[in-house]
């Protein structure tokens, strides 16, 4: 009986660990929210679009991307639950890379993790209020512009130490040149 209880406890712990139980953050298949939580260390729950308001009073928020911050996509008809992604690299003032899950199809299915994907500010005021995302199915930036609420920084407002982002948040050799070409063509 103790063995069964220990196996059940281990299974529950692995399930609670979320994307990391897959052995690698990049092997994750599922929704963007648990992935962003594991990748950033930011502990917010609920649909992606609700993260912006839920962060108030808990985490610092702002309008500029920082490595390790979570970008919150607003709810739209195309994104009824919103979307969250973690900033993995800053390329230039209007181009960053994100690591996220459940965006492009891979092997015909959604949910897979993608590392160092191009995200471009296309807002008229250069204020990161509207973005386009690299889309694997098109092998380039998608044609849809998405409104975003802003960026949640990993700095808690209560002065607690910030969580550490996952070590696999970014790759060794991201394609900066490709990101810039995609963004400015």
Image (cartoon, rainbow, N blue to C red):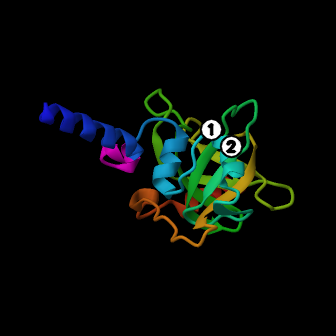
Q: Say if 185 sits above or below 137 in the image.
A: below
Tag 1, which secondary structure? loop
Give coordinates of residue 169: x percent, y percent: 46, 58
State the extent of the magenta-drawn residues as a range.
20-27
- For the residue carrying disc 2, how many other residues have a C-alpha within 10 Å: few (<14), some (14-19), or many (20+)? some
- For the residue carrying disc 1, how many other residues have a C-alpha within 10 Å: few (<14), some (14-19), or many (20+)? some
Residue beneath label 1, please? Answer: 47
Residue beneath label 2, please? Answer: 50
Q: CA distance from mark 2 to mark 1?
A: 6 Å
Tag 2, which secondary structure? helix
Q: Nearer the viewer, residue 29 or 144?
A: 29
Q: Residue at x 47, y 26 (%)?
A: 108
Residue 31 appears in view: yes
Q: Are marks 2 and 1 in contact (CB under 8 Å)?
A: yes
Q: Which mark is on residue 117?
A: none
Count of numbered circles in the view: 2
Give coordinates of residue 88: x percent, y percent: 53, 60
- Quadrant the N terminus occupies: top left
- The part of the image, by quadrant, that contains residue 19 is top left
């Amino acid at each position: 009986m103790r063995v069964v209880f220990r196996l059940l406890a281990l299974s529950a712990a692995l399930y609670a660990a979320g994307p990391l139980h897959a052995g690698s953050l990049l092997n994750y298949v599922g929704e963007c929210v648990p992935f962003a939580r594991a990748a950033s260390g930011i502990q917010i729950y609920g649909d992606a679009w609700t993260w912006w308001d839920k962060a108030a009073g808990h985490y610092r928020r702002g309008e500029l991307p920082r490595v390790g911050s979570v970008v919150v996509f607003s709810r739209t008809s195309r994104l009824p639950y919103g979307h969250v992604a973690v900033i993995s690299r800053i390329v230039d003032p209007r181009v960053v890379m994100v690591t996220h899950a459940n965006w492009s199809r891979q092997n015909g299915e959604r949910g897979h993790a993608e590392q160092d994907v191009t995200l471009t500010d296309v807002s008229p005021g250069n204020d990161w209020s509207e973005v386009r995302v690299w889309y694997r199915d098109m092998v380039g930036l998608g044609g849809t512009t998405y409104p975003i609420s802003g960026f949640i920084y990993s700095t808690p407002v209560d002065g607690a130490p910030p969580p550490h982002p996952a070590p696999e948040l970014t790759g060794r050799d991201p394609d900066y040149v490709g990101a810039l070409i995609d963004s400015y063509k």
